[in-house]
Amino acid sequence: MARKRARLNIVPWLWTALFLNLGLGIVLSPVTEIRRVRVIGAHEAQQPLIRKRLQALANVPSARASLDRIVSFIQRDTSIERATLRRNLFGSGVVTILNKRSVAVVDGDRNVVLCSDGSLVVRADSDPEAIQFSATSLAFRPSFTAMGTWPGKAAADLSAEICDNAAFGVTGLVQDEGGKVSLTTEGKATIILGTLDNFRDKVSALKRAVEVEPEILSRVKVLNVSAPSNPVFVPK
């Protein structure tokens, strides 16, 4: 007696195909485009360019949107340290901007700032109270290129150190033709650091001097900490 052939149940396959088509239709449909994007952390001057980059998301299904490419375009702004773009399933996204920390402005151009990584960037909204960096020699003049003898990273590290010690009241950082650095204060002493070598030891010596005598910068004309173990001062 011939065995009966089992009947193929195609119902599960039909349901699978249906859900697969619905899923692909939803994912690949322009309905899933990112329609609202919130920008966090950007300066007002950065907003127009970021919004222009985000226009690439218009009418693009979520699954086809190249978020990494858009982030790459946003990060062409050299004042940005890092940018991220996240989205959800409801047509919303968030751009988060982390800007480079500015530690000084270049004397003579308030829109050019020195960042903590030693780079120079143009920023329309620089801090009016920021330390001013100036060089008396072309050899040490701040440069947007990697060429020349200007030690951008060392100058930035020193500026950041000074910014973190507001009690010093430093308003300017001056580098002379020999590469030696002095700090200017408003109505107080000029602080001589010498070269940028071992500048952290020199700043530590300055801290100790201020801790021992809080009014020392008002009492003296010059405080020389170029030899950290033996600070020298010139009275007013």
Image (cartoon, rainbow, N blue to C red):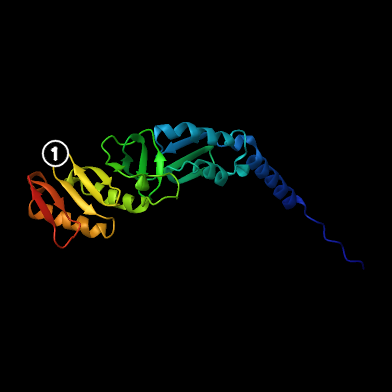
The kind of residue on which mark 1 rests is: Gly
Q: Quarter of the image holding residue 169?
A: top left
Q: Quarter of the image holding residue 41?
A: top left
Q: Which residue is at 33% across, 49% downward?
A: 156
| Viewer-nearest residue: 147 or 56 | 147
| Viewer-nearest residue: 12 or 122 | 122
Q: Which residue is mark 1?
A: 187
Give the image location of residue 155, x and y in percent: 32, 50
Q: Is residue 56 left or right of residue 82?
A: right
Total tally of numbered discs in the picture: 1
Q: Residue furthest right?
A: 1
Q: Which residue is at 65% across, 44% downward?
A: 23
Asked which secondary structure carries label 1, the reply is loop
Q: Quarter of the image holding residue 204?
A: bottom left
Give the image location of residue 26, x and y in percent: 64, 40
| Viewer-nearest residue: 55 or 212 | 212
Q: Which residue is at 34% across, 36% downward?
A: 126
Residue 110 appears in the picture as rendered:
yes
Residue 214 appears in the picture as rendered:
no
Q: Quadrant of the N terminus?
A: bottom right
Q: Is residue 202 left or right of residue 235?
A: right
Binning the other alpha carbons within 10 Å of mark 1 as few (below 14), some (14 to 19) or many (20 upward) gives: few
Q: Quadrant of the C terminus?
A: top left
| Viewer-nearest residue: 176 or 104 | 176
**Residue 203 sits above or below residue 137 on the image:** below
Give the image location of residue 130, x and y in percent: 27, 39
Give the image location of residue 100, x and y in percent: 38, 45
